[in-house]
Amino acid sequence: VIFAVHHPSQEAIAYALNLSGTYYEAFRAMYETKRQLMLSALDSAKLKYFAPQGTYFVMADYSEVFDGSPLEFTRYLTREIGVACIPPETFYSHGHMHIGHGYVRFAFCKSDELLRQVQERLAKLGST
């Protein structure tokens, strides 16, 4: 017995399950390229990171290039460098916010052109 199934979602899933394997291979390759572009951008900024294996987000340690909170770093990066990221403190309860200190989260589900611009902009951070 199925209860409250969203019909359009069922249609979309059925369609996706019938796609050829080459679609998924191309999709994976596309995101591997995007991931590498982002990781290269983080390298140019001298940011340490955990290379993601199954998501289009990457956590980066900024503690060697900036002295401040994740929120202060995200504001600096947005205003001065022109790159947006998310302070991970927002994902923790008040008592656990310290776990995200020194880190920010970047998303690489962007166009390759934009990711190349991110690399150019983040390189400014690495040269300071």
Image (cartoon, rainbow, N blue to C red):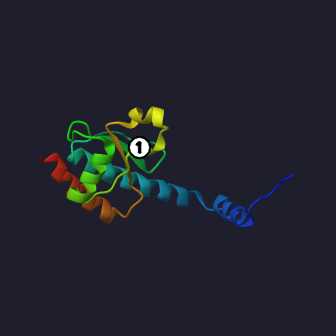
- Measured as percent of width and height from the top left, residue 4 is found at 79, 58
State the residue in front, 91 or 10. 91
Relative to residue 18, is residue 51 drawn left or right?
left
The picture places residue 1, in percent across and down from the top left corner, at 87, 51
From what the image shows, is residue 95 above or below residue 60? above
Q: Is residue 23 above or below residue 87?
A: below
Amino acid found under the numbered disc labelled 1: Pro
Give the camera-side residue of 127 and 87.
Answer: 87
Label 1 secondary element: helix
Mark 1 lies on residue: 88
Residue 25 location in percent, x, y?
50, 55
The image quadrant of residue 121 is: bottom left
Residue at (33, 47) in percent of width and height: 71
Quick one: which residue is furthest to the front in this view? 94
The percent position of residue 5, horizontal first and vertical second, equals 77, 59
Q: Count residues near mark 1 (Cα–Cα under 10 Å), then give few for <14, some for 14-19, many for 20+.
A: many
Q: Which residue is located at x 17 percent, y 46 percent?
A: 126
Give the answer, above or below, for where 102 lies relative to 20: above
